[in-house]
Image (tube, rainbow, N blue to C red):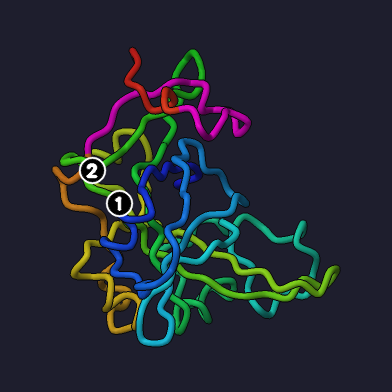
Amino acid sequence: MCGRFTNRLTWREIVALYRLAVPVAPERNLPARYNICPTDTVDVVVPRNGGRDLVPMRWGLVPAWWKKRLRDVPSTFNARAETLATKPMFRDAFRSRRCLIPASGYYEWLPTPTGKQPYYYTARDGAPLTFAGLWDEWKNIETDEPLRSCTMIVTDANALASKVHDRMPVLLQPPDFDAWLTGRAGLERLKPAPDGYLQAWPAARRVNSSRAPSDDPTLIDRVAA
């Protein structure tokens, strides 16, 4: 499963890539992040008023019908492609609340005799990655505050990713964006990335800790495996 990712995209890059409907909005400062973890706030692209908007959300979906406390929500930062249409946690969002999650790369871990070795995956050509996602809005039963949250969809790993883990995020291309957000694309689109699309290398083991600073670019440097 994918439990960490990076996002180095600038505001202008995100506006251009996702064609956000912000012709007069001020430019936002989006600092580069190299260690985004579950329950962190992430930037998510959603459809709005016939266009697209960038909205901050909790990474770890809380469905609108959830009746318990936030701390009681199970791990929902990933949704398996083969069960999201039927699993109660995700099925409503799959029907009507799709999103795109911008990224630069993601991490997976390989067990070794000396501990878990992180590997960093990114596009071979250096282009941004876009994870297929779902989102929902929930009212916190303790504070009455609304909370928007999201999940990243994962599927079977392709040949490269399977060397480290048996799952990988569903990666969408710009021609897929509209069909995914509007619901025209269904389960048939949730496939592994083509072989040759990604590259990977061993990264610093400091990223094994969720406390590793998110603004440290050396976390993704290539190291000896």
In magenta, the rendered stretch is 199-216
Of residues 49 and 135, the one nearer the viewer is 49
Q: Is residue 184 left or right of residue 65?
A: left
Of residues 204 and 74, the one nearer the viewer is 204
Residue wearing tag 1: 129
Is 213 in the magenta? yes
Q: Which residue is depicted at the point 28% across and 40% down?
A: 122
Is 210 in the magenta? yes
What residue type is disc 2 on?
Ala
Residue 76 in the image: state x and y as whole percent.
Answer: 58, 59
Tell me the SS state at disc 2: strand
Residue 119 in the image: state x and y as whole percent.
Answer: 37, 30
- Looking at the picture, does residue 172 appear above or below residue 198? below
Q: Is residue 10 left or right of residue 177?
A: right
Q: Which residue is depicted at the point 44% across and 21% down?
A: 204
Q: Which residue is depicted at the point 34% across and 58% down?
A: 14
Of callouts 1 and 2, the N-terminal one: 2
Mark 2 burial class by Cα count in 10 Å: few <14, some 14-19, many 20+ = some
Residue 210 in the image: state x and y as whole percent.
Answer: 60, 34
Residue wearing tag 2: 123
What residue type is disc 1 on?
Leu
Q: Give the Cα distance between marks 1 and 2.
A: 7 Å
